[in-house]
Amino acid sequence: MRAWLLAAWCRREGAFSFYPALLLLAPFALLFSFLSALRRFAYRIGLQGSVALPVPVMVIGNITAGGAGKTPLVLALAESLHQAGWRPGIVSRGYGRKDDAPQAVFPYSSPAEVGDEPVLLATRSGIPVWVGRDRAAAGAALLAAHPQVDLLLCDDGLQHYRLRRDVEIAVFDGRGVGNGHLLPLGPLREPRSRLRGVDAIVFNSVTEPIALPGNAPTFDMHLTAGDFYRLGNSALCANAADFAGKKLHAVAGIGDPERFFRSLKRLGLQFEPHPFPDHHPYRKSDLGFPPGEVVLMTEKDGVKCATFNLPDAWVLPVTAQLPPALTELLLEKLKNGRQTA
């Protein structure tokens, strides 16, 4: 059922002629649309309170369900803004965590307790990372613990209107807006008209044009792969040639597993693909391949499997390459300063 629904969501040319059963979800999409609009209106007129933190807030999110490359973009922005003189921190929801209270994240934190992406952000960025269901509370806790931080990057949270923001960035990958319908009829969390209010749109490795409303400037982001490193031992590295002649299994529990598989193919590797749902809570049995066979995985999967002590598992890190014009635009926005609900 999940695979069928995702396939229906991703058909750009109109899903109904191919998936007429989707029409059964139309009433729920209308209800979702009404409640979403009502919620945003309540924040706009002040019926729902929003919180302005004492430092600028930059939200990196999307209007579609599922990952589109927000985490590598957050990492790249944190680095570029740090080089420009800012001292950023990162706040995130922490998908799947049971505790809603704000909590600091460290490279050694348990992904089950704080979320997989926050652990990856803490490991790669080296800057303060906090999680919490209430991003405003998480941001306030981060600032109290790290008073040197003068900018907050919010990983996801475009729809978290309780937190006021100075800059909004929407991210899209090659799936675009899918069939263009709201949940659960399609993948959209908000209507496409929401993009008229963002400050920038970033396309992650998009090869075909995506028609979007509004006049927000658009920028292309590309992910470049580094050397593989051994799961649980990042000091031990390998390249694609080191896997020649071996049976390879590619594991990906991200928003678009095919994106990882395409990266491996570009490296000239032949493998058996094993897609999993986004944020999949791995068990060691999920990766119980025969002895002598190699497992390749994303960094997001790697943080959840680090304790499995697999004999031959390797992680492929990726880094987002951003155009300088994007950083220049964001610096100008931060210089001008504005708070929106």
Image (cartoon, rainbow, N blue to C red):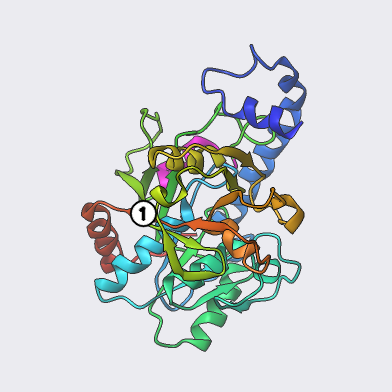
Q: Is residue 115 above or below residue 215?
A: below
Residue occupying the point 44% across, 77% down: 127
Q: Please tell me whether mark 1 sits on a helix, a strand or a loop.
A: strand
What amino acid is found at the position of numbered circle 1 in the picture? Ala
Q: Where does the image place residue 5, in percent across and percent down from the top left?
A: 69, 30
Q: Where does the image place residue 247, in percent across and percent down from the top left?
A: 57, 42
Q: Where does the image place residue 16, in percent across and percent down from the top left?
A: 65, 16
Residue occupying the point 72% across, 36% down: 31
Magenta stretch: includes residue 61: no
Question: Magenta segment, which residues?
Answer: 189-197
Q: Is residue 189 above or below residue 97?
A: above
- Residue 168 shown left or right of residue 255 in the figure: left
Q: Is residue 269 visible?
A: yes
Q: Is residue 283 visible?
A: no
- Residue 328 shown left or right of residue 76 in the figure: left
Q: Where does the image place residue 288, in percent across and percent down from the top left?
A: 72, 51
Q: In this view, which residue lies farthest toward the top?
A: 17
Residue occupying the point 71% across, 70% down: 100
The answer to which of 6 and 271 lies nearer the viewer is 271
Q: Main secondary structure of the magenta part?
A: helix
Q: Which quarter of the picture shows residue 4?
A: top right
Kindly identify which residue carries mark 1.
320
Quadrant of the rendering where the N terminus is positioned: top right
Q: Is residue 34 above or below residue 296?
A: above
Magenta stretch: includes residue 193: yes
- Residue 24 shown left or right of residue 227 in the figure: right
